[in-house]
Amino acid sequence: MNENEIQLKVQALVDGELTGREAEELLSRLESDAGLKALHTRLTVVRGLMADAELPRTLPESGDFHWSQISKAIELEERQAKHMARPASGANWLLRWVLPLAGIACLVLVLSLQQTTMPDLDILLGSDHELELSIEDLDVMTFNTEDDNMSVVWLDYSIDLQQDEIDLWLD
């Protein structure tokens, strides 16, 4: 280490910034080197003088700040006292038990009144479950089988084609 690095280590020792092992090594070196010991002594004295000469600085508090803190503390104590002193009333029991039970009863009522049957669409199914619908040019036939769990839907779209339209269509 050069001289400058050693002086920085001495300053770090005075400031208490060295680890235990580094401090021990530097203290053993200070005992053997008179120049470093003198530097350590001077830095320690200067540090002590600076610490003693430093005046404590306090910020002035305004009167409003002081009184606002007092009023906040009083309000907090009053709220806590009201909370602790308030007995459980009948209204609390009503809010805790009766209202949720009334809500559950309403929900059960709504669910029980729902229509469980299919609405009547004026469509009659035959014994073979066929449904037929005819709208002008479109015929729809539906067949459901219970055996195979299958549904067949037949769409028949009939077009009245004239002879000349058929010729154009075939070309």
Image: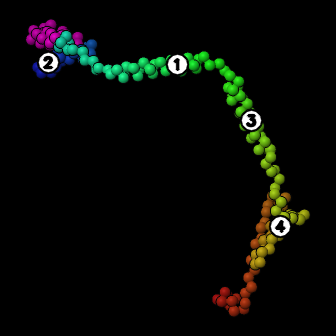
Query: Which sits earlier in the primary sequence, circle 1 or circle 2?
Result: 2
| Circle 1 Cα neighbour tier, 10 Å, few/some/many (<14 / 14–19 / ≥20) | few
**Disc nearest the viewer among 4 and 3:** 3
The single residue placed furthest to the right in the displayed view is 127
Q: Measuring 82% from the left and 62% from the top, which residue is drawn there?
A: 121
**Disc nearest the viewer among 3 and 1:** 1
| Circle 4 Cα neighbour tier, 10 Å, few/some/many (<14 / 14–19 / ≥20) | some
The Cα atoms of the two marked residues, 4 and 1, are separated by 78 Å
Relative to residue 164, is residue 147 depicted above or below?
above
What stretch of residues is rendered in magenta?
Answer: 22-49
Residues at discs 4 and 1 in contact (Cβ within 8 Å): no
User: Residue 44 in magenta?
Assistant: yes
**Image quadrant occupied by the N terminus:** top left
Q: Measuring 24% from the left and 15% from the top, which residue is drawn there?
A: 56
- Residue hosting label 4: 131
Q: Is residue 46 left or right of residue 70?
A: left
Considering the whole magenta stretch, tell me its main secondary structure.
helix
Give the amino acid at mark 4. Leu
Give the amino acid at mark 3. Ala
Relative to residue 170, is residue 80 depicted above or below?
above
**Disc nearest the viewer among 2 and 4:** 4
Query: Which sits earlier in the primary sequence, circle 4 or circle 3?
Result: 3
- Residue hosting label 1: 78
> What percent of the width, then of the height, locates residue 113?
80, 46
Query: Which sits earlier in the primary sequence, circle 3 or circle 2?
Result: 2
Q: Under tag 4, what secondary structure?
A: strand
Relative to residue 82, is residue 170 depicted above or below?
below
Give the amino acid at mark 1. Glu
Residue 7 is marked as 2
The Cα atoms of the two marked residues, 4 and 3, are separated by 46 Å
Q: Measuring 53% from the left and 21% from the top, which residue is drawn there?
A: 79
